[in-house]
Amino acid sequence: MSRPELAAARALAGRHRVKWWEVLPWVAGIAVFFLLPGYLAFGTQLLIVILFALSLDLVMGYAGIVTLGHAAFFGAGAYTVGMLAQHAGWNEPLSGLVAAALVAGAIGLASGYVLLRTQGLTLLMLTLCTMALLEESANMGHAYTGGFDGMPGLQFLPILGLFPFDLLYYRSQYLYVLVVLFVCFVLVRVLVYSPFGQSLTGIRENVLRMHAVGAPVRARLVIVYTISAAIAGVAGALFTHANAYVNLATFGLDRAAGVLIIVILGGYGRLYGAFVGAIAYMVLEHALAKAYPTAWQLGVGLMLIAVALYARNGLIGLGDALRRRVQAWSGR
Amino acid sequence: MTAALLETRRLCKSFGALEVARDVDFRLERGARHALIGPNGAGKTTLVNLLTGLLAPSGGAVLLEGEDLTELAQAKRVKRGIARTFQINQLFRGLTVLDNVYIAVAERLGAGGSMIRPAGRRADVIAEAAGLLETLKLEDDAGRRIHELPYGRQRLVEIAIALGLRPRVLLLDEPAAGIPSAESHIILDAIAGLPKEIAVLIIEHDMDLVFRFAERITVMVSGAIFAEGSPAEIAANREVRAVYLGSAVDV
Amino acid sequence: MDLISIALGGLAAGMVLFIVSVGLSVTMGLMGFVNLAHGGFAMLGGYVIVLAMSRWGVPFLPALAIGFAAIAASSVVFERLLYAPLYRASELDQVLFTIGLVFVMIAAVTLGVGPETQTVVLPEWLRGQTDLGFIRYRTYSLALIVTGTALVIGLWLGFERTRIGARIRAAVDNRRMAESLGVDVGRLFTITFAFGSGLAAVGGGLGAEILGLDPQYPLRYLVYFLIVVAVGGMGRVTGVFFAALLIGVLDFLLKIQFPKGGTMFIYALTLVLLLWRPQGLFGRRSG
């Protein structure tokens, strides 16, 4: 092989290797635990949002399935854990996570199998309708779900029997969510760098071409949709565990739109986009939204327009562009 | 008469009142070097779309070695050995040239659905993809993204993908369109290098290329087969000439 | 409430849905652009109309005309400056942009006018009830039904009988072929977009009585507009008409009979309908 080819092949072969800076987010996560003990409640919510955004990025950023209904799976996981604790006395957290993943994954499989026959506006509408239906069911089934008020005051057993949930300082919650996020992240990372993950990118880039190389497109989409739903369900379960309550907001369009904004803001189709977007969005929201809600909405709106027009690859994309310019400038 | 490798029987397709394929009985033999020519709008690309399953026919059948493919979806026909290139490039524009061919080879080897092992660990896929780039003189562009390449080079990637599928039947829709004539020999060389058993069908307007490549030529006009025969027969056919001249005058 | 009252009430609401959504349907069918901000134009138009009447004493019908003109004109600016660069962009980018735009519209109205619901003072001749013989019903609702019917007939004639209508239909069915036949699709779209947004503005004003008018209007009704367009089929005026009536009547009926679970039925119905016919009840399957 001549040189450029060899270089390209080597680049492909080494793409999945862990880079040094990939350790940083996790180091930072642990550092926050020790350095910012007063912010662990916020930190826990942030980590949960990151996990949820990661699941959406898998389905939207990599596979190109635009959905406004992903909160359906978040809510499904959240309510599964809540209902198991409230009605079945099943409040062991780790097995609750598994149950949430299974339930959300099953809903993902069923809805994905049926919905992913369609595309464009029809698919968008169908995802919205599915989520709205689940929300309405939770609203109406108040014997099981607590209806409009949800289920407050849930109680869970300590994690692994050793670490009780602490609603005051969120110490155990924070580490618990951090560990689960790490495990799920590793899973997503493996998936993204596999040939399966690459075929998802192919589907997103040119679905006609994927058909024309013999890829079973619909099967791949349903599989990734199911996996993504399961992860979103885990995020929802973590929400219920960490906050000891669950309500209809876990299903709402607000949450679904919010996580979509986060994925785009960070950079879709990029592993760390969920991290960057969630941190940027939630920190800003925390600082601004309560004080100036209308100005916040205006700001978010303008930011979305700017991103759509000029920075389609989000913050990470801007970072890449900046890095390329610096490299070109320093003549490397 | 031996069974053709790929054939159609009374294949029809209409869009409402518009008939784009009329009772087409087309045969592609094993090892064929077959060219499909005709004026614009004759239905050549439509025929390829029907053969590959991108379009469903209104009537008739598509058969591969006697097996009826008419109900099969595109992807399944690719698995049976039919590959094509598109008139307008259908590539993964944000990915590198190597990635584009990798995807095709991975699908062929059944590795496309593998979820655990990283894509980079499949050295066999990478090597084969890199080899295909060499065949089409694309090595220098291996690491560049598609949208950075000039159109002509992109066209070669389109062909590399089709070759990566190691098909039994290769359908090329205007492969040389957009490629500077100085480089069009690259394609001919690549096709000449194909195993003899592969059947190749080319849609082309470049008559030089057609007559250098083809052992058999089919002429389509207005959705139907107008004439068929060896290059010499077609060249001598007055009606074919008239149709081409006539179509230049008609709107 | 008896059946006829329910039917009339639902029809009136459906007419408003139709007037607002028809523009969205045609522009989506024409350009394939997912415009989630369409409800924002309806809201802005509604505000222009209501404020013209309440603050500047403009009479009802001229206010509607002003609303139409103002929103149509400003939508041209939006379209050329902001929408046009995104025609070739991915669906995701379009969704993103239009969500951002609607946020900006809502915030702007909240900051400029305030978060309260706007009240409409109807002119004398539209107040009260009218006696139809078999029933006495709200004059305004009846006027809405008449207006909506007149509009759909007018639009249908426009599409079927005029040249520009033929061009729009051709471009909706097959944009590339229309372009190769010499249709200037870009300019067609600007005109259609302006007209559709203007109609939405009128719908926003007309519907203020029934659907309410406040800054949250676009998001609250977004799903309804999208359902109407998806079920009716993109680019199908008559399809949108019947879909809007269907949704309007159903929603009205359900809110009365099943105040708890009503909306669920609409979502379930949309789900079933779109799965059965993804192109909408009246849409044409592509390819």
Image (cartoon, coloured by chain):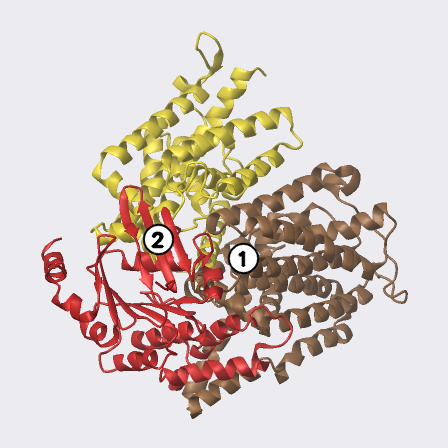
Return the x and y of residue A128 as percentages of the image width and height: 57, 46
Q: Residues within 10 Å of mark 2 (few under 14, many from 20)?
A: some
> Quick check: B164 left or right of A18?
left
* Chain ID of residue with mark 2: B
Residue at horizontal 54%, vertical 71%?
A198
Q: Residues within 10 Å of mark 1 (few under 14, many from 20)?
A: some
Residue holding disc 1: A218
What amino acid is labelled 1 in the image?
Arg
* Chain ID of residue with mark 1: A
In the image, residue C278 above or below residue A192: above
Q: Please give the count of numbered marks on the rendered protein.
A: 2
Residue reaching furthest right? A161
Q: Which chain is red?
A: B
Residue holding disc 2: B9
Return the x and y of residue A184 as percentages of the image width and height: 69, 68
Q: Which chain is brown?
A: A
What amino acid is labelled 2 in the image?
Arg
> Quick check: C67 left or right of C96?
left
Asked which secondary structure carries label 1, the reply is helix
Asked if the residues shown at circle 2 and circle 1 are in contact, with their CB atoms under 8 angstroms apart, the answer is no
Residue reaching furthest front? B1
Q: Quadrant of the C terminus of chain A?
A: bottom left
Residue at horizontal 37%, vertical 25%?
C149
